[in-house]
Image: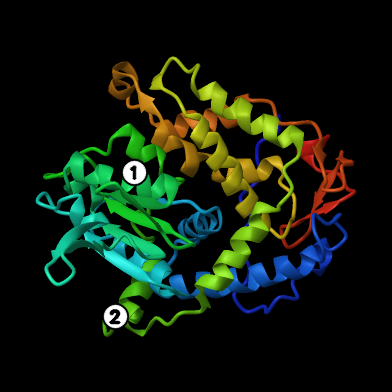
Amino acid sequence: MTPSTQPAALPEHSFGGGGLNHVNNTAPVHSRPDEVLAELHAVVGRIAANVEKVIVGKPDVVRIAIVTLLAEGHLLVEDVPGVGKTSLAKALARSIDCSVSRIQFTPDLLPSDITGVSIYNRQDNDFVFRPGPVFANIVVGDEINRASPKTQSALLECMEEHQVTVDGNTYPLSSPFMVIATQNPIEMEGTYALPEAQRDRFTARVSIGYPDPQAELAMVDEHAGNDPLADLRPVSDADTVLKLVHAVRRVHLSPEVRRYAVELVSATRRLPELRLGASPRSTLQLVRAARAQAALAGRDFVVPDDIHAVAVPVLAHRLVLTAEAQAARRSAADLVRNLLQRVPVPQAALDPSGQFLQNVQRHPGGHPVPGHGDGHHR
């Protein structure tokens, strides 16, 4: 198996939709996929440019955030204080003209503070449901692990089933629906570790990390005098995002790539360093994220590189290490990277017309062009 290539970069923010002509020769999944992909690139480019006004020098983090949005998932941003976790969540939310709510998780927060509560109305002699902040398209949960596990569990039904049940009544949530939660490392004071069931519902986890000196200098020059979030304006809307989400669902997933994703997730359950491997839910979210990654790369079909590009953010936070592995300072992310090197990559991938792509060549801009040689499909 040859090493995976680097993840495809986000589209250039300056183009307006004409940058996909070199992939129009792929067989279509539906009518005019080039137009849909061109629109997706244009919208993603605008959102990425908007977010990068706030988060400087972190294009891969922005890419995973947008992939999670298009994959109908939820994002967990974990890092030390002060690196821009909340700013990332708020920048992505403000880039889309939709309903947004913010929840500050604290130790005294109650589940009803999130989902809502039924209040007795004396005039009607009946209870009236008052929706909580979870009734929004994008819910920003700040420092989620500072609330008790009881309160954290209030998000379980919301994130998995897109609905809320209060006093025996079920209320659907609007679409699109995305939870962007931030948390501090569990070593920090006043934090409660997220339960496994809660972590498993987050499609991806990212860590922003400290910026390099040049990016930090640019941040000081641009942000010291004003707050970039205050000037941020929406560059898309909920209807457009929902349209792109439906387009990502139609990205072709060949049987070979599907089997590769299953084998990769199954391999985590056999690692001696883990006492809990990845769940079947993670397999579904891995392929959804891979579809979104393929669409960002300008393709309407998934190749193994797309799995590689999202595997660590999607799988690592779900793995529970043994005490011995923790003592040896092994990391879940390193274990996933090792599996990417060990699990055999499919020798051929199917294009959307059902034909095998034995060879795929990288376009100079980073997009594959069917019909030419590439190390992954020899």
In the rendered image, the vertical position of residue 192 relative to residue 23, given as above or below: above
Residue 129's image quarter? bottom left
**Quarter of the figure with the N terminus:** top right
The percent coordinates of residue 226 (x first, y second) are 28, 84
Mark on residue 81? Answer: none
Question: What residue is shown at x 65% (from left), y 68% (from top)?
Answer: 41
The percent coordinates of residue 158 (x first, y second) are 37, 50
In the rendered image, the vertical position of residue 282 relative to residue 37, given as above or below: above
The percent coordinates of residue 46 (x first, y second) are 55, 75
Instruction: Identify the element where label 1 is drawn.
Output: helix
Question: What residue is shown at x 9% (from left), y 51% (from top)?
Answer: 108
Disc 1 residue type (three-letter)? Leu
Q: Nearer the viewer, residue 225 or 177?
A: 177
* Disc nearer the start of the sequence (2/1): 1
In the rendered image, the vertical position of residue 269 relative to residue 127, given as above or below: above
In the rendered image, the vertical position of residue 325 relative to residue 285, given as above or below: above
Q: Give neighbour class at mark 2: few <14, some 14-19, many 20+ (Cα, 10 Å).
A: few
Distance, label 2 to label 1, CA atoms, is 34 Å
Q: Is residue 76 visible?
A: no
Q: Nearer the viewer, residue 19 or 255?
A: 255
The residue that mark 2 highlights is: 227
Question: What residue is shown at x 20% (from left), y 46% (from top)?
Answer: 151
Residue with the most extreme left position: 108
The residue that mark 1 highlights is: 156
Instruction: Identify the element where label 2 is drawn.
Output: loop
